[in-house]
Every structure is written in structure tokens, then in C-alpha cells.
Amino acid sequence: MEGEARAGDTHWGTFLVEHYWPGVTPAAFDEAAERVRSSAEALARAGEPIRYLHSTLVPEDESGFCVLEAASQGLVEEAYARAGVRFERVVHAVETAARHGEIALEGGRSS
């Protein structure tokens, strides 16, 4: 993902967008994340190298996180501006995944 060449030899990065919203409900966060996803899709249809990946809400911390792939942080910020969704910051991130067949066990160990 990060640094990989995509169509048109564009280098993409992964970006984590942090949201801190006191009193946010799951429905309100879902609606905001959907607006960002739609905005990113519209930019992609216009030829911009951006893709919405997923979002996570942490209700007890009143925070949420969205992850997008894009050619630049500026493109992520543009998607948010078009969606009308506020955020605290955008940071470059590295996504990892467990190897196929591994199961996470209690205490952070994996089988």
C-alpha cells in the first residue's frame, strides 16, 4: 500500500484521520464517515488518486478514526473539506494485517 505504484505510476500512502467529538453517537459518526467516503469516491471518479478504506469509532473515548489511501495528505484534506467534516489531524500511517490463519489470543499472543 504505502509507496506502492498504482495506476499511472502514482505513489499512494495510507493516512489516518483523527476525530475527537464529545457526545458523538454511532449514527452521527457513521453519517460523517459516509460523507467522507462519498467525497473520496467523487474525487476518484474525477481522476484523483484517493480511496476511502474504513472507519472506527471508540465511543468511550468520544473519538473516531478514518483510514484513506491517497497520493497526498492534501487530497485527504480536500475530501474532508468537500464532505464538510471536521477533524483534528491527518497523519501518515502504516497498515498491517495478521498472517492468514493466525488467531489472536488473549494477552496479545497469536497462534
Image (cartoon, grey):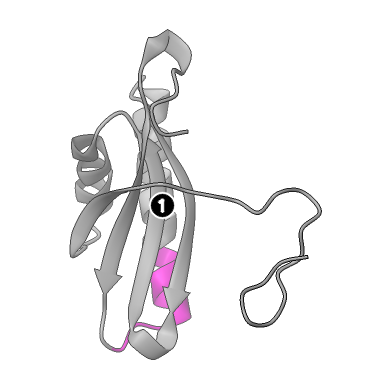
x and y percent of residue 105 in the render? Answer: 72, 75
**Which residues are drawn in magenta?**
23-31
Furthest residue to the top? 8
Q: Nearer the viewer, residue 90 or 2?
A: 2
Furthest residue to the right? 101
Residue at image x 27%, y 69%?
19
Total marks in image: 1
Q: Is residue 25 above or below residue 13?
A: below
Residue at image x 44%, y 56%?
34
x and y percent of residue 108 in the render? Answer: 61, 75
In the image, residue 62 lies in the stretch drawn in magenta = no
Which amino acid is tagged 1? Val
x and y percent of residue 72 in the render? Answer: 25, 33
Residue at image x 40%, y 45%?
68
Q: Residues within 10 Å of mark 1 (few under 14, many from 20)?
A: many
Where's the C terminus, which quadrant? bottom right
Q: SS class of the residue under badge 1?
A: strand
Residue at image x 76%, y 58%?
102
Determine which quarter of the picture holds residue 65: bottom left
x and y percent of residue 100 in the render? Answer: 76, 48
- Residue that badge 1 annotates: 67
Classified by dominant secondary structure, the portion drawn in magenta counts as: helix
Q: Is residue 11 above or below residue 81?
A: above
